[in-house]
Image (cartoon, rainbow, N blue to C red):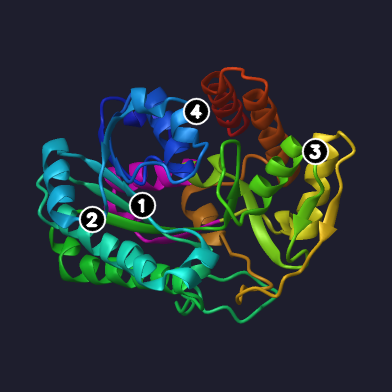
Amino acid sequence: MFDLSFYKGKKVFVTGHTGFKGSWLCKILANAGAEITGYSLAPTTNPALFEIANIEKDVNSIIGDIRDLNYLKKVFDEAQPEIVFHLAAQPIVRDSYKDPIYTYETNVMGTVNICECVRHSKTVKSFLNVTTDKVYLNKEWNWGYRENEELDGYDPYSNSKSCSELVTHSYINSFFNDMGIAVSTARAGNVIGGGDFANDRIIPDCVRAAIKHENIVVRNPFSTRPYQHVLEPLYAYLMIAAMQYEDKKYAGYYNVGPDDIDCYQTGSIVDVFVSKWGDNMKWINKYDGGPHEANFLKLDCSKLKATFNWKPHWNLDIAIEKVCEWSKCWINNEDVRTCMDKQIAEFLKEGK
């Protein structure tokens, strides 16, 4: 069974380390004793988990643009990593409609750039590209998509991530297979967790409304999404990267999502949040039309379960409870690093 102690003393390179998922990933790696170099733009939200939790003390933090190959390669070569996690991305669907060029430049050429760094490296043994469940051609099926389904995301964000997958596949076939580098992609569903301050995400919207004592505005209460706590996919990423480092047979393409029972309509997840938060909160339906977004989307994670004997640690009820716990810790000016450490420890204990 995978043990996080694998990462003790390992040199790890993380792109997108200042983001929500990147900050949690760096905290786990730091707790495990890894030597981390992070490369990312400055945090894009205010407030930002990276700053609130002082993640910079855990990482050799380099502020740079993933589109800048020359600078990225300079930093990468100096770090001489053994393991690479590629999280840097423009991750918001609605923003991709507003600025598709930037979205494609970041999500596609950013992947090309990190693949080039790995290709020219003499130290990398394991590389994981993190994409999304939205890479699939969405046919509004009632069953989950498997890893061999067609890749063809609809909107610029989803499509750019489909392209990121194809870039990775091409580099595997053209270069990495002959180099002994183990490479995987991980397609994760929607994540929630303490410290997510992004726009156009339902749980951050809930927290913002709670702080202001306002009603929660829900723009599409009937869309169905697979929700999971952020620690779920991060643990899976760490597991995949470690296992393929030890044995290349584990390299491949993996869906990372919750069990079917935790595929909730947006309105239902807000109901759970309201019940956990208390304070007589309410939500209102304000469907705004908006750009196209899938109504129904879920993943079949049988491959991840069969390959690694993996299973989700926390159901959605517990996940939202942990979001509320972290958020109230932050609101009350308590030490959020301690809260993160506590939740990480509880999560790992649950998995044993």
Residue 32 is left or right of residue 338, and the answer is left
Q: Residue at x 47, y 58 (%)?
A: 91
Residue 205 in sight in this render: yes
Mark in front: 3 vs 1: 3
Mark in front: 4 vs 1: 4
Where residue 118 sits in the image (x, y, percent)? Answer: 18, 53
Tag 2: amino acid = Ile
Mark on residue 317? none
Tag 3: amino acid = His
Instruction: Check disc 4 and report the residue beneath it.
Output: 52
Instruction: Check disc 1 and report the residue beneath it.
Output: 88
Q: Indicate which disc, 4 or 1, sits on the residue closer to the N terminus.
A: 4
Tag 4: amino acid = Ile
**Bounds of the magenta segment:** 235-256
Instruction: Check disc 3 and report the residue beneath it.
Output: 213
Q: Indicate which disc, 2 or 1, sits on the residue closer to the N terminus.
A: 1
In this rendering, is residue 290 above or below 273?
below
Give the Cα distance between marks 4 and 1.
Answer: 20 Å
